[in-house]
Image: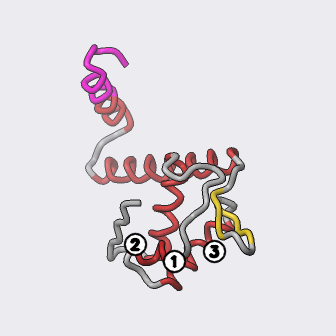
Amino acid sequence: MDWQIRDDAPIYSQLVTQIKLGIAAGALSPGERLPSVRDLATEAGVNPNTMQRALQELERQGLVYSQRTSGRFVTEDTDVIENAKSSLADEQVRSFLDAMARLGYLRDDILRLLEARIREESGNGEL
């Protein structure tokens, strides 16, 4: 994973979000075994206790589970993964809409901008 730790939020919550994003995006497959806490912590450049806390939160959310002698695994419950994906998407949309509102854009302005961008990226002028 490409770990990006910022100073504006607790590290463990950033780890939770980044691992959740990896699961939702398919970078971590359902049923995939996760590296050990120590290995993940080293890779992310964080304290193992912080990584342990993040993984415990992901377990609480049902995105990962532990097997006593085998380690932690990504859930195989696709409904849980889809819910996480929807939740992350909703956070992105809310953040975008809040930023646009702070810039003074109204709903119709935002829709026009989005439609123009989609047309531009599709290259054929259609939505």
Percent position (x, y) of residue 52? 57, 79
Where does label 3 land, which residue? Answer: 56
Residue at x 28%, y 14% (from the top left corner):
124
Q: What stretch is highlighted in magenta?
A: 115-127
How many numbered discs, if any? Answer: 3
Left or right: 94 as drawn, with respect to 78: left
Q: Compute the Cα span from label 3 to label 1.
A: 9 Å
Mark 2 highlights which residue? 44
Which element is circle 1 on? Answer: helix
Which residue lies most toward the front here?
Answer: 69
Q: Spot the residue most to the right.
A: 68
Query: Badge 3: how crowded within 10 Å, few (<14), some, or many (20+)?
Result: some
For this rendering, which residue is in front, 121 or 38? Answer: 38
Any magenta on residue 41?
Answer: no
> Mark 1 packing: few (<14 Cα in 10 Å), some, or many (20+)?
many
Left or right, 59 with respect to 85, comes to right
CA gap, disc 3 to disc 2?
A: 16 Å
Amino acid, disc 3: Gln
Q: Which amino acid does label 2 sit on?
A: Ala
Amino acid type at image mark 1: Met
From the viewer's perspective, is 13 left or right of 123? right
Measuring from the top left, give residue 18's x and y in whole percent: 46, 61
